Image (cartoon, rainbow, N blue to C red):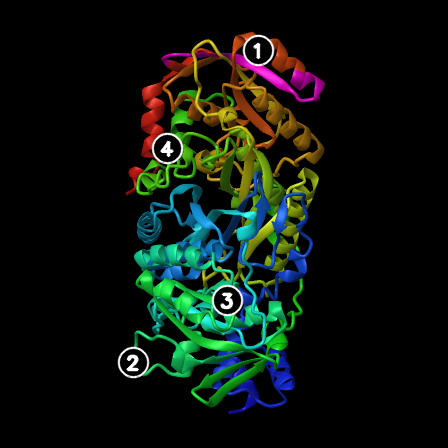
Amino acid sequence: MAKLAVAAQHGFSDREYEAICQALGREPNELELGLFSLNWSEHCSYKSSKRFLRRLPTVGKRVLQGPGENAGVLELENGWCVAFKVESHNHPSAVEPFNGAATGVGGIVRDILSMGARPVALLDSLRFGELSDGKSRRLFEGVVSGIAHYGNCLGVPTVGGEVYFEDTYSDNCLVNAMCVGLLKKHELKKAIALGLGNKLILAGASTGRDGIHGATFASEDLLGDSEEKRPNVQVGDPFVGKLLIEATLEAAKLPELIGLQDLGAGGLSTAPPEMAARGDVGLAIDVTKVPLRATSMSPYEIMLSESQERMVLCIKAGSEQKFIDIYRKWGLEAAVIGAVIPECVYRIQQGKKIVAEIPIPILVGGSPEPELDTRQPRYLGSISQKRVTLAKTFDLRERLLSLLRSPNIGSRRWIYQQYDHSVQTNTVINPGEGDAAMLRVKGGKFALAVTMDGNARHVYLDPYEGSKRAVCEAVHNLVAVGAEPIGITDNLNWANPTDPEVYWTFEQAIAGMSAAASALGIPFVSGNVSLYNQSEARKIYPTPVVGMVGYLKDLDKRVPMGFQKPGDLVYVVGKLDGNFGGSEFLKVFYNFVGGELEPIDLNFEKRLIEAMLSLADQKLLRSTHDVSDGGLLVAIAEMTLPKGLGAELRLQLLTEEKLFGEWPSRFVVSVSPKDKNKIESLLGNAGISFESIGPVERTTLNVNGAAISLAELKTAYESALTRFL
C-alpha cells in the first residue's frame, strides 16, 4: 500500500508517517501502526495543546506530585495527602450515554488508585443541549444514570458538580468526571518500570474486544452515524471495580511493588510504554500470557483493547506469586505478561515470535507537534458590541421566579438524589447545602472542600476573561465554605484545533487561567484536554472546567450557604457594580447571548479572598454564597431555601442589571448583629466594598416592598429540571 494511503487510513499526517518510518528505519507493520495511532493520538499525546499547557503554574508549597503522573498530589497535614484529577469521556457518552459516562467514572477512579490513594469522592461537570430537545434529554438521563450506577455500586460518594444546557452541546455532550483520593505520604506510588528482569503483571478483569481504538475515536470530530462508533465505547463493571480497588490497595503495601498504572485510553498499547519511558527502560510483552474473555483475539486486538477494570504492576522478580495470590483472593485475574529488558524498546511477542518492536522514546511523547495557526474569531468583534434595551419597569417577582425555573440555575436535586453522596460517611456538606462539598478526614480535625466549575458562555464571549472567571469562581466556591484553595485540576473541552479560530481561543483561555492561578498562588497539578468536540453542524463553546481542592484546618469553622437565624444582617461584599454581559438573564428574557464581560481585578480578588477567609476563620460568618449565575437576587433566593428563612431587603437600585447581572468578585453573607462593627472594620481595612441590605426574617423574601413567598421560590427552583423530564 502506498505510504500516503497508509497514513490517511490510520489518521496520520504525511509528516507524522514519515517521522515513524524514519525512526524505525522501515515502514511499520499493522500492529505497530495501531500502537502509534493510540500513543500519538491527541487524547494521549496532547500534541496540539502541550505547547500552551507548559504556561500554567505548577509549583507550590504543598505540591508533592504535579503534572506528568496519573493524578496530582498535595500534602495536607499529619502525613495526609490528597490526590485528584479530572478526565473527560465526551465522545463515548455522546454515542452510548450510560456506558460512556459509567466508564468515565471508572477510569478516573483508577487514575487516583494508581497513585496509591483510596478514592473518597467523585464530582462531575456535564454539558448538554437544551432540555426542550428530545435527544438532549435522552443523553442527559443516560449520563446521569451511568454516573449513578458506577459510583453507587463502587461505594465512592458523588458529592458535587455542575451542569449546563446550551444548544452548542446538542451534538457533543460533555462528561467530565473528577475523583479525589486520600493517602499517607509514604504510600505514594508512581507509574514507572525499573530494574532489568523485573516483571510486569496485568491484574483485574480479563481482556475482551471492547473499546478498541477508543483513544483515536476520542481524537477526531464526531461525524457520521453514531451507531458505527458503539464498538469504540468500553463497557465497565463497577463490582469488579470495587474488588480492584481493595486488591490494589492491599498489593500496594507490598515492598516489592515498583510501579503502578491503570489501563485507560489505549490499554496495553499506552500504559506499559509510559511506565518504561519514566524509568528509561524497555519492556517485552507476550500477548499469549494475557488473560482473555474472548476467543481467538489477535495481537492487534489484545494490545488495542480498552477493556475496563485493569491495572499493570511492575514488581521485583521473584515476588510474582505474592501479587497473584492477592488478586485471586479478591476473585480477579492476575498474570505475568512481560518483563523489563535492557533495550529501550517496546517489544510485543506472540510466544517467541516478535510481532512489533518500537523504540520507547519515539513511541511515548515522540509525536511531532503540529504546525497550527491562530486567528481571532470573527464573531468576537460583533457579539461584544451587540446591545439590548433593558426594561425600565418590570415585575421583579416574575423575573426572579422565571430565572429560578431556568435549567441552568434551578435545583439539581433530580441529579444528586440519584447519587449516594453519604457512603463512606465523610461528607459533611452535602449537595445543595453549600457552594462546595466538604469531606472530613477521619481521625483529624481538618477537612477537604471540593468543587468543579466553569461557565463556558463567558469563555465564548471573552476567552481570556471568561477563563479567569472559571478559576476565580472555583476559588469562590471553596472560600464560601471557609476553605483555603490549594490546588487545581482542569479539563479543557474544545472543538477542532486545526481551526485557527478555535486554536486562538484555546491559547487565550490558557493565558487567562494562568494569570488567575498565578495571581492567587494556586498550582495546577493535573488535568486533561479533550479536543475535536464538534459535528458537521456545531462546535461546542470553548469549555474549560476547573476542579479545585480546598483545605480547612478546623472542620468546626465550615460555613453553610443558607440563612441561619432571623435577625441576622445580610451584606453584599466585594465589587458592587458591573455589567450584564453573558448573563443567564439576557438569554432567558431577551434571547440574547452577548455583551462585554466585566474584567476581573486580580489584585482586588486576592484581597477579597483573604478577607473572606479571615472572617470565616474568626467564625464571623453565619452563611455565605458567592454571586454567580443569575446574579445577586438569585444568590439571595438560593440562601433562603436550605432552612426556609427569608429576608427583608432594601436595595439602592432596582434595575435588571443590578439584580441579575453576573459580574464577578461578590459574595452575599449573613452575620450576627453583634459582629456588625467588627466585620465592617475588617472589610474597610482590607479595602473591600460592602453594602448592608437588610435582615434575615422568617416567612418571605421581600425586596423593597415586593414580597415573594418562600414556597413560591422553592416550587420554581425545584421544577427547573423535573418539568422537562
Helix, strand or loop at mark 1: helix
Q: Is 548 situated left or right of 309 in this image?
A: right
Check if residue 697 falls in the magenta segment: yes
Helix, strand or loop at mark 4: loop
Query: Picture coordinates of residue 619 (x, y %)?
Result: 55, 19
Q: Can you tell which mark lies on residue 219? A: 3
Residue hosting label 1? 675
Q: Is residue 710 above or below residue 30?
A: above
Q: Which residues are magenta?
A: 682-699
Q: CA distance from mark 3 to mark 4?
A: 36 Å
Q: Nearer the viewer, residue 314 or 436?
A: 314
Residue hosting label 2? 295
Q: Residue at x 53, y 61 (%)?
A: 531
Q: Is residue 171 visible?
A: no
- How packed is label 2: few (under 14 Cα within 10 Å), some, or many (20 or more)? few
- The disc, 2 or 4, on the residue closer to the chain's N-terminal end is 2
- How packed is label 4: few (under 14 Cα within 10 Å), some, or many (20 or more)? many
Q: Residue at x 40, y 30 (%)?
A: 404
